[in-house]
Amino acid sequence: MPILDLQQRMMEKGRIRLGHKVSGTTRAGKAYTRPAKLETFKLTSADRQAVDAAAALYGGQVEPFNDGEYGVVTDAVALNVILVPGEMGWSQWREMWGNKVCHRRCDGVRETISDGPCQCPADPAERAAQAANGRACKDTTRLSVMLPDLPGLGLWRLESHGFYAATELAGTIAILSMLAPGTLVRGRLLAEQREVVRLDAEGKPRTNKFVVPVLDLPDVRLSELVAPDGGVGVQIEAPARRGLSPVPVAELPEGPRPSIAEQVAAVPDKPKPRKNAAAPLPATGLSPRKSSGEVSGPVPPAGASPAVPAPDPEAPGVTAPVEPDAVVTAGVEVGSAPTGGVKSSGGKNATGGGAGPGEPRPAVDAPSGGCTLDDLDAALPTNKWNRNKVLREARRIATEEIGLEKPPTEFDDLAKPEYAPILTRVCELVGAVAGQPKPLTDKQRGFMHAVWAKHGGDDARKAAISRLTSGRTDSSSELTADEVSALMDLTAELDKEEAA
């Protein structure tokens, strides 16, 4: 089974090109090189054997190309290819390169390298003018195919920056993905000569000639593929694999089948325990403690339960120094303190000492650490916690340490007043403090950068953050939950003003 977070791909065998560089000399005697278009395909690769085979098959003379590579300008205007499915053989981006490094890569809206909005002009003509000078992105279409007539296993990549290649190849790939999802498809790659006539800056017609890479399936009839209603009739079948037998399709048994309700009823209520599972804890016979501090129901006599001995009111408790505050929830105290100045650890008479049976617990205010649910939520990623883990710990504290009948069922329940002591205790375990910085989500950060880019840029955004924090910081990564909320409200107002 492959690693799930690694994208599968094949090695690149070589490149398919529709242009090359020509050299010359100016009238002043200065040498130069410039790009020029080809009317046939050029193949380049570091594999000399593959290039020699291409020259023998398609014609042309093998020549050195770059460092350690070889190339051949063939006589072919069409190549037999095998299309590979998915992202392994197809990609489209707007990219800006410089010094052999990709500085920008966007999809027209989002720039993926900086994780911000696209920085190029929205007007196509302005973007094309800046791209010619290396200051904006170019439409970059990459098509990787197999050349079955050449030796070796690998992909040959065709790269184009043309408008027609970007639009037409994308449409062809979209149709093929519907007709032949997840399969290898045989096709033809053509170098089609085209020309368009447009008016120049002086209003005179000018003819532009260029080459467009085109994909076609010459052996496929659309009448066999498209159903009369416009849907897919017969999908393109994958090529047969030698040495493999098809897996027989299991047939459903004949006769009446149980309904969904009958199938659900047949499932046992409790799952079968593991062989090495621990034995279940025996019942104690005690009812949960009430908010009044009393035990509801009869207290079992000593020896009634072998797992939990009956409490002895006269037994001396395990003592500890008196603490100024004791955590209580709805009148139930965690650890009681008698008037003698020592506290019985373990709560209500669990080890003796403390208040006697039936005596009300003294009401003690819960400590107010100031940690809110937003502070706790903001501290989770930093301290390697998550909401599910917090909820499990909160339910354990509620049932085992405090003895609540209704523990919290959701993470947001911790914001309720009756669960304030549990929230304080969980904040201590997680390490959350009041005013905990809360990182922005990717969606919030992208929206913020996109809006503020139109309202003064980074300087205006930092000035606004400084005002919101009273000069404490101008960085969005140091904001508390309340400050993040205020910043996003301000950003939304600016966005609405622009829309109006």
Image (cartoon, rainbow, N blue to C red):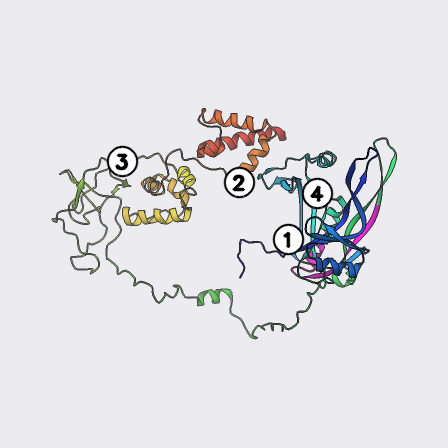
Tag 1 secondary structure:
helix
User: Circle 1 sits on which residue?
Assistant: 87
Tag in front: 1 or 2: 1
**Count of residue discs:** 4
Q: Amino acid at mark 3?
A: Asp
Tag in front: 1 or 3: 1
For residue 182: magenta? yes
* Disc 3 to disc 4: CB gap under 8 Å: no
Query: Where does residue 356 sit, x and y in percent of width and height?
Result: 16, 45
Q: Which mark is residue 442?
A: 2
Query: Where does residue 429 sit, x and y in percent of width and height?
Result: 33, 43
- Figure quadrant of residue 162: top right
* Disc 1 to disc 2: CB gap under 8 Å: no
User: Circle 4 sits on which residue?
Assistant: 139
Tag 3 secondary structure:
loop
- Figure quadrant of residue 451: top right
Tag in front: 2 or 4: 4
Residue 465 seen in this snapshot: yes
Q: Amino acid at mark 2?
A: Asp
Of pointers 2 and 4, the one earlier in the residue sequence: 4
Horizontally, is 253 left or right of 40 in the view? left
Horizontally, is 495 left or right of 340 in the view? right
Q: Where does the magenta region start and end?
A: 174-194
Of pointers 1 and 3, the one earlier in the residue sequence: 1
